[in-house]
Image: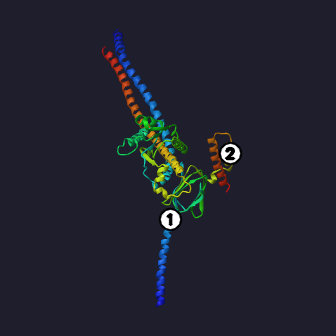
Amino acid sequence: MLARQALCRVAKPSVAGSAPAGARNMATLREIEMRLKSVRNIEKITKSMKLIASTKLAKAQRALNSGKEYGLANSEIFQHASSEPTGKRKLFVVVSSDKGMCGGIHSSVSKATRREFADKDSDLDKDSPIAVIGDKSKSQLSRVLPGNLVISFNQIGRDIPTFADAAGVADLILKSGVEYDSIAIVYNKFVSAISYESAIVEVQTANSLKESPGFSAYEMEDDVTTDLAEFAFANAIYAALVEGHACEISARRNAMDNASKNAGDMIGNLQLKYNRGRQAAITNELVDIITGASAL
Amino acid sequence: MSALRLVSAVGRRATRTLVDARRGYAEAVSDKIKLSLVLPHQAIFTSTDVVQVNLPAATGDMGILANHVPSIEAVRPGVVEVVESGNASKKFFVSGGFATVHPNNKLTINVIEAAALDAFSVEAVRSNLQEALRVANGNGSEEDKLEARVEADVYEALQHALSH
């Protein structure tokens, strides 16, 4: 009889006390379990994105080296035939891309462009046209300098940029009839696998080449100045596209690496919480049982 | 005695001419020009010292030696021959671009595509040329026909280069 009474007294508290407490713990435990599952999925995704970016980076760096040599050979003429353009209308070609998850790549070039326009010491014409390559920078710049955007490009930079891409961009810009006295290409320069910085490279137009004193030292049988200027423009865009692409891939690799590390930390914390919660639930049940048993 | 003076004078002149000859050797090094032959996806030569470069300029074939006067030439599709030293020369077929000789004895050639002559297949060139000629003389748009005409010109130049 005493045993039966004890059993009843044990049964009631365990049903009345631990059901809400246990249910509360179970609910919290369930929540933590769900969060754990989703963070584990995120970690898998960011790890695989990092792996893809790492493999793409090797190829992009090789293209970068060749593209840089190409750009250097192209700009040799500008070093010998430099000139100050008389007009102050500068065409900015902002080189970026359409995809995100790459850290601060797009805001880096957008900020550099904004800085040029906001610079009070320079006598840049504030109506200067801007040509944007890449939807992300386009949306950033259209918020800050909406009146200056004249032409934009997208679907470039999904893979290693080719000369055909750069030639197409140059062709469309030249065909659009935009007027400018000089050209500045804003892109991200590859400093190392973990860092990049925005840079601006100046390209001369046919007119400023003709006005340059150093240019007259060059002999030309036919006057190919316009062709040379257009070719040099396409070359400079190509070099900037390739370098920007390499910067973007390395930035994406680093961003996904950080995200994976953060996800790993979160998983550790959540796992600890889960274990503590599980142990707390067990301890509570034990306490209830023992309390009930000691009341006998 | 006068004979002795003569001999010593000749001896002095001889040593002087020997010194002049030694100075002459130093100038021989700048007989090379620094060539940078670069494609968008590959750098074939980067500031390499070469003896002579023959290019197919739009205004006619020309050969560039060291200390050439600065000039800018458009390059038409054809064979660029690079003589590095002695008689060793390398030939590349280039698609077109610009060649610039700079005042500091540098030659930069930016072309879109280039390949060694033995990388081409004569069969492929012939069939592609026929295809391009067909489009050029066909009923497409003006732009397509112009593009095909340019393509046919390149293939014809390539055929000419390969048959030599």
Asked whether the residues under marks 2 and 1 belong to the same chain, the reply is yes
Q: Which residue is mark 1?
A: B30
Query: Which residue lies at the image location 68% right of the left edge and 55% below the top edge?
Result: B163
Q: Chain of mark 2?
A: B
Report helix, strand or loop for mark 1: helix
Q: Give the Cα separation between the discs numbered 2 and 1.
A: 47 Å
Q: Looking at the image, can residue A191 be seen?
A: no
Q: Is residue A51 left or right of residue B114?
A: left
Q: Position of residue B45 (x, y in %)?
A: 53, 55
Q: Is residue B149 left or right of residue A202?
A: right
Query: Which residue lies at the image location 68% right of the left edge and 45% below the top edge?
Result: B133
Q: Chain of mark 1?
A: B
Q: Residues within 10 Å of mark 1 (few under 14, many from 20)?
A: few
Q: Position of residue A50 (x, y in %)?
A: 47, 38
Report helix, strand or loop for mark 2: helix
- Mark on residue B133? 2
